[in-house]
Image: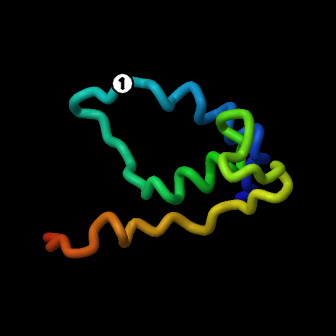
Amino acid sequence: MTMPPPEQQRLSISPLVNVPMREGQEYGVLPASWYRLWKDFVRFDGEATDGLQESDAPFPCAIDNTSLVDGMHIHTN
């Protein structure tokens, strides 16, 4: 699968950012640090938060949710 270009990613996700959560819907959770890197990569707010040019902001690596579950006991069936 080919990764969509940054502009297409931004245009696909931006309408969904402020959609209210509803009971019964499923959502994915990701680390805020990864989300900030992605926002810089796609220039989500019009410019990179760290001052990088679009071509300088690397694509964030794979999402690692380890930090979200460290110390939690996870039950499996």
Q: Amino acid at mark 1?
A: Pro
**Residue at (46%, 26%) from the top-left corner?**
18
Q: Quadrant of the C terminus?
A: bottom left
Q: Nearer the viewer, residue 70 or 46?
A: 46
Decide which of 27, 57 is in the foreground and name it: 57
Q: Is residue 77 visible?
A: no
Residue at the spot x=66%, y=34% of the render?
Answer: 45
Q: What colour-coding does the image apply?
A: rainbow
Taking depth in this image into account, of 66 and 5 the one nearest to the observer is 66
Crowding at dot 1, Cα within 10 Å, few <14 / some 14-19 / many 20+, comes out as few
Query: Looking at this rendering, what residue extends furthest in the front direction?
Result: 51
The answer to whether any part of residue 40 appears in the image is yes
Q: For this view, does 69 lie left or right of residue 37? A: left
Q: Which residue is mark 1?
A: 20
Residue at screen point 62% across, 52% down: 38
Q: Is residue 38 above or below residue 9?
A: below
User: In terms of depth relative to the viewer, which is nearer, 71 or 9?
Assistant: 71
Q: Percent from the top left, x then y, of residue 71? A: 20, 75
Which quadrant of the rendered structure holds the N terminus? Answer: bottom right
Using residue 77 as the reference point, say whether residue 13 is left or right of it: right
Q: Is residue 37 above or below residue 20?
A: below
Please name the residue shown 40% across and 66% down the image: 65
Residue 25 % position (x, y) = 30, 34
Residue 10 position by quadrant: top right
In the rendered image, residue 26, in percent from the top left (x then y), is placed at 32, 41
